[in-house]
């Protein structure tokens, strides 16, 4: 019998609890172990996940139904181990936990690795863009500090000794600004390379799928 919508809602709520420690006695007593296994299978969780439920329910004296769980898990894995799902799992950067049976794993892994490579290319580009943006923000802060130094330099309240220190601070800030500019130049080149690699791979995927 396929799991009911109500059962799925219960399992989703239960499985999101930390270590399933928040399961109540009523939830343990009414748990449909086949449905639990099916849900875990469709999410790519290993059979050993049943240990979480077993531990949570044992304090109420409720034992798990391993046979039903495994049967449901096997059905769920059939849903999970499809190539399209493999690509999606890889593209989200999620780890594969080796749950697919031998006859389904090769196609699943091929799609998973394709999605994973796309994820890595996109992550690399995002990292580079984040570094560039961070450097630009740092330069904007330096500009504000230099402006404040300029104001202090012309102030009548600033002593000659303080002006000497301000000149030194301005020189250090100017040097740091230049270092950031040099880093941005390198990062911009890396971004171009990363964008090209991503575009080429996207074109390759478009021709394959």
Image (cartoon, rainbow, N blue to C red):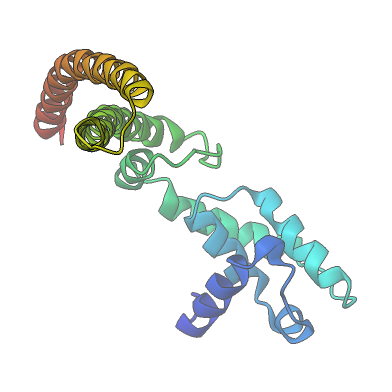
User: 13 above or below 134?
Assistant: below
Q: Percent position (x, y) of residue 176?
A: 29, 18
Question: How many marks overall?
Answer: 0
Nearer to us in this view, 7 or 3: 7
Q: Give the side of residue 208 with respect to residue 80, left or right.
A: left
User: Can residue 122 be seen here?
Assistant: no
Nearer to us in this view, 114 or 142: 142
Q: Percent position (x, y) of residue 108?
A: 38, 37
What residue is drawn where x is 43% and y is 38%? 104
What residue is drawn where x is 56% and y is 74%? 13
The part of the image, by quadrant, that contains residue 111 is top left
The part of the image, by quadrant, that contains residue 202 is top left
User: Can residue 23 be seen here?
Assistant: yes
User: 8 above or below 168?
Assistant: below
Q: Percent position (x, y) of residue 19?
A: 70, 60
Q: Percent position (x, y) of residue 208?
A: 15, 30
User: 206 above or below 37?
Assistant: above
What residue is drawn where x is 49% and y is 81%? 4
Q: Give the side of residue 128 with respect to residue 77, left or right.
A: left
The part of the image, by quadrant, that contains residue 175 is top left
User: 49 above or below 154?
Assistant: below
Q: Give the side of residue 147 with respect to residue 82, left or right.
A: left
The quarter of the image holding the C terminus is top left
What residue is drawn where x is 57% and y is 79%? 10
């Amino acid at each position: 019998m396929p799991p009911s919508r109500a059962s799925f809602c219960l399992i989703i709520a239960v499985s999101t609890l930390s270590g399933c420690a928040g399961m109540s006695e009523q939830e343990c007593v009414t748990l449909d172990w086949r449905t639990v296994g099916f849900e875990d299978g469709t999410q790519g969780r290993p059979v050993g996940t049943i240990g979480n439920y077993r531990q949570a329910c044992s304090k109420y004296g409720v034992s798990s139904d391993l046979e039903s769980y495994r049967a449901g898990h096997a059905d769920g894995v059939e849903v999970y181990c499809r190539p399209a799902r493999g690509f999606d799992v890889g593209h989200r950067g999620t780890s594969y936990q080796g749950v697919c049976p031998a006859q389904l794993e090769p196609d699943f892994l091929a799609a998973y690795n394709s999605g994973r490579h796309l994820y890595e290319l996109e992550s690399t580009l995002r990292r580079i863009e984040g570094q560039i943006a961070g450097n630009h923000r740092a330069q904007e802060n330096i500009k504000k500090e230099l402006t404040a130094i300029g104001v202090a330099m012309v102030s009548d309240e600033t002593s000659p000794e303080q002006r000497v220190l301000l000149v030194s601070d301005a020189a250090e800030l100017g040097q740091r600004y230049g270092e950031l500019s040099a880093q941005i130049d390198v990062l911009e080149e890396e971004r171009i390379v990363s964008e090209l690699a991503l575009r080429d791979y996207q074109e390759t995927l478009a021709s394959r799928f």
